[in-house]
Amino acid sequence: MRLSCIKLVFMGIIRKTKSVAAVLQIFEEQEDAQSVVHLIELLKDEMNRTTVYRILDRFEKDGIIHSFNGKDGLRWYAKCHGCDSNHHVDAHPHFQCTECDKVECLSLEIEIPQVKNHKIDSTDILLMGQCEACRH
Amino acid sequence: MRLSCIKLVFMGIIRKTKSVAAVLQIFEEQEDAQSVVHLIELLKDEMNRTTVYRILDRFEKDGIIHSFNGKDGLRWYAKCHGCDSNHHVDAHPHFQCTECDKVECLSLEIEIPQVKNHKIDSTDILLMGQCEACRH
DNA sequence: TTTGTAAATGCGGCTTAGTTGCATTAAATT
DNA sequence: AATTTAATGCAACTAAGCCGCATTTACAAA
Ligand SMILES: [Mn+2]
Ligand SMILES: [Mn+2]
Ligand SMILES: [Zn+2]
Ligand SMILES: [Zn+2]
C-alpha cells in the first residue's frame, strides 16, 4: 500500500482509481473553483459524467473540496484548506467575475450581525464584479 | 384607463391581465419570498407555467420584485421596496430556514471589505439556520 | 500470483427547472 | 365595433443532476 493510498483511505476515499486521481489532480493544479459543468467537459474522454458527480460527492464528504452555488445557479467546487471528513472548517466568501465567470475563494472575514429571533448556522456569500484580469 | 392601470404602465407593465393581477396579489399579500416552483404550483389552475416565468421576468425588470438563488439553487422572488425599472436600489441579504425552507428578506447592512485588485459590483448573501417559528 | 470482494464505474433512462417558437387570445386604444 | 399588438397557451426542447443496475476493477487475503 503506497503512501498516497494510506492518505486517501484516511480521508475516506477507499480506492485510488484512475478517475479519482484525475479529478484530484485538477484541484491540486488549480486553486480557482471549478464548475461541475466545466469538470465534466474537461474529463469527458476519461470518465462518465455520473462518475464526476460521484467523485465530487465523495471528495466533499471527505473534506477534500467544498461546494457552493455560483451566480447562475451552477454548482462549483474548490479545494479545502484544513478540513477533514468530520469538520468543514473552511467557511469563506467567494467571488465570481461577471465578465470571464472565473470563481475565486476569498480569505476574508465578513462580519454577520445577529438576526433577531433567528439562529444562523451558515452563510453563503458571493461577491460579483470584475476580477484582476478583467479590470484592465 | 383606471388608476391601477396608469400605475402599471408607469412601471412598464403594459396590460393588466388576469394573470398579472393574480401574481401581483400574491406579492402584495405575502411579504416572504416565493420560489418559482411554489408560485407555479399556487397558480397552476389559473395560468400556464411559462406565463408565470414571463410575468416574473417583467415584474423584475420593472422593479416590482427582485430575485435571488435559494440554498438549493432554486430561483426565489420577493417584493421590492423603493425600486423602479431604472434602479434596483433594494440590495439586502436573505435568510432561508433549513427546517421549513421559508425565505425572508433581511433589512440588514452587511459590511463588505475591499478585495484587493477586484471591483465588487454586487453581492449575493444568504444566511441559513432556524427561523423564528422553527426555533421553538 | 491468484482469487474473492465490494467499491467504483458506465450506461441508459429519468426528473425537473427553465427556455423558445409559434399560433391564438384578449386588453386597450381608436 | 374594429384594430393593434401585448400577453398567453402549448408543445417541444435544453441542460443539470440523479438513479438503478449490470459490469469492471482495486486491493486485500489466501
Ligand atoms: Mn471556497
Ligand atoms: Mn429580498
Ligand atoms: Zn474576469
Ligand atoms: Zn423555519
Image: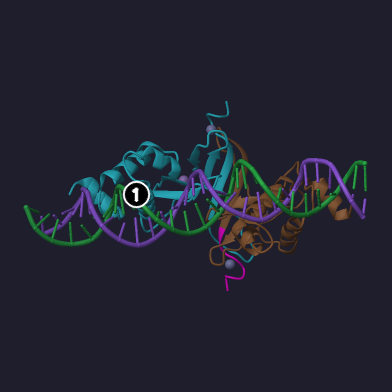
Chain colours: A brown, B cyan, C purple, D green
Question: Is residue A129 a member of the stretch shown in magenta?
Answer: yes
Query: Where residue B100 sits: x, y (%)?
Result: 53, 33
Q: Residue furthest bottom?
A: A136
Judge left or right: residue B117 versus residue B47. right
Query: Where residue A135 sits: x, y (%)?
Result: 57, 70
Query: Where residue A4 sits: x, y (%)?
Result: 85, 55
Mark 1 is surrounded, within 10 Å at the Cα level, by few (under 14), some (14 to 19) or many (20 or more) other residues, namely some
Q: Secondary structure at mark 1?
A: helix
Judge left or right: residue B98 versus residue D2. right
- Vertical placement of residue A21 versus B92, above or below: below
The residue range painted magenta reads A128-136
**Tag 1 subunit:** B
Q: Residue at x 57, y 55 (%)?
A: A70
Q: Which residue is mark 1?
A: B51
**Main SS, magenta residues:** loop
Residue A92 appears in the picture as rendered: no
Instruction: Name the one closer to the observer, C27 or B2.
Output: C27
- Vertical placement of residue B37 versus A136, above or below: above
Q: Residue at x 71, y 45 (%)?
A: A61
Question: Amino acid type of disc 1?
Answer: Thr
